[in-house]
Every structure is written in structure tokens, then in C-alpha cells.
Amino acid sequence: MIRGKINKGPEVIVLTGPESTGKTTLARQLAGHYGGQWIPEYARSYVENLTVPYTYADVIHIARHQIEVPEQIINSKMPVVFLDTDLIIIKVWLSVVYGKVPEWLHKAITNRKIDLYLLCRPDIAWVPDPARENPGRKREELFLMYEKEIKKYNFRYGMVSGSGDKRFFNAVNLVDKILRNRREGEK
């Protein structure tokens, strides 16, 4: 089921959810399937290139980048854009790790033009890597936090579950629904 508000302009679809839930793989697959643009997760490359542990200032830098770069592409003539994560993950990250979130981030989330969030369930195996911090039950807790935030902002969303091709086809079905709803709304 898809819930929440709809956007005008290019289709903007965000893949979100806890670490190691297939967001990057799905974003790439969906962009290929729909002939759209995939925007990689900036936080991952940024953190992987640090030589010291990340700080609050680093997360704020990531948030500001996340606001600026996708807006440039979203304002282009692309028919559909798939964002590998977005500001809601950063908001939860700041809240969980540092216990504080700047007011401007809330405003930036409120003003986002998102057609659909694909919330990835933590129902696939955890794959450790140096940029990941939250294995086990923590992934389920984070999943619920992301869902709560998406609902709070009244964004349209659907939940992606399953593994392999089933996960991909579940995501395609959700994207097809939003695209179909958009086309019917334009008639």
C-alpha cells in the first residue's frame, strides 16, 4: 500500500531503510529498469574517505550536500530519479548518535519534493563493512524510526521486502503504482 502526498514534476523516488537492506542495489536496478537516474549515497563515500571517526560536523556536511546535489538533478529534465537514501536517514542518524537535530533539517525535509519512499525492511542478511554500524535488532529499531519519520512528514511510501528478484519485483510494483497514479491524475 502507498500512503501520503504526491509531487509535481520529475518522479522522485527515495530508497531508505536501515543499513544492509539492499537500498543501493535496488536504486541501481530501478534506475536501469525505468531508464532513470540513480543518485548514490553520499554519506557512504564521505565516511569511507575519512581517516578519523566521523563527527557531528561531518553529518551536518553530509546533510547539506544531500540537500544541494539531488536538487540540481531533480530540477533537470530527468523523467525519474532514484535517490539512494535521503534526509530522513540523516535526521534519524543525528538523533540516535548525537541526540540533536538542527531545525533547518526539519524544514528541508518538509520542503522535499518526493513522490515515493521505498522503505526497505531489514529482512535480508546483514553484510558487514567498515561503513556499517548497526547489525542485529538495531536494524529493526531503525526501520521503525524511519517509518515513523516518513509518516510524520506525510510522504507517500511503500515497504519493500523479500530477497533477490522478489525484492526487486516488490519494489517495481510499488513504483508502477505511483507512476500509474500520476498518469491517471494528469488525465
Image (spheres, rainbow, N blue to C red):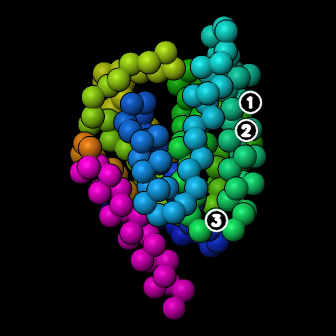
Mark 2: amino acid: His
Q: Secondary structure at mark 1?
A: helix
Left/right of residue 176 with respect to residue 9 in the rendered view: left
Establish if 123 lies above or below 167: above
Mark 3 or 2, closer to the camera: 3
Q: Residue furthest bottom?
A: 187
Question: Looking at the picture, how far across and down is residue 94, in whole percent?
Answer: 60, 28
| Crowd around label 2: few <14 · some 14–19 · many ≥20 (10 Å) | some
Q: Amino acid at mark 1?
A: His
What segment is highlighted magenta in the picture? 165-187
Q: Residue at x 51, y 20 (%)?
A: 131
Judging by the rendered image, the residue that carries numbered circle 3 is 78
**Residues at marks 3 and 1 touching, judged by CB atoms closer than 8 Å:** no
Mark 3 or mark 1, earlier in chain: 1
Mark 1 lies on residue: 61
Name which of mark 3 and mark 2 comes first in the sequence.
Answer: 2
Residue 182 in magenta? yes
> How far from the left and from the top, in percent, is residue 100?
64, 27
**Cα distance, mark 3 to mark 2?**
20 Å
Do the CB atoms of the residues marked 1 and 2 lie less than 8 Å apart?
A: yes
Between marks 3 and 1, how big is the CA–CA gap? 26 Å
| Mark 3 or 1, closer to the camera | 3
Magenta segment's dominant SS is helix
Image quadrant where residue 122 sits: top left
Residue at the spot of label 2:
65
Identify which amino acid the numbered label 3 is placed on.
Answer: Met
Regarding residue 105, the answer to whether it shows in the image is no
**Residue at the spot x=39%, y=30% of the render?**
20
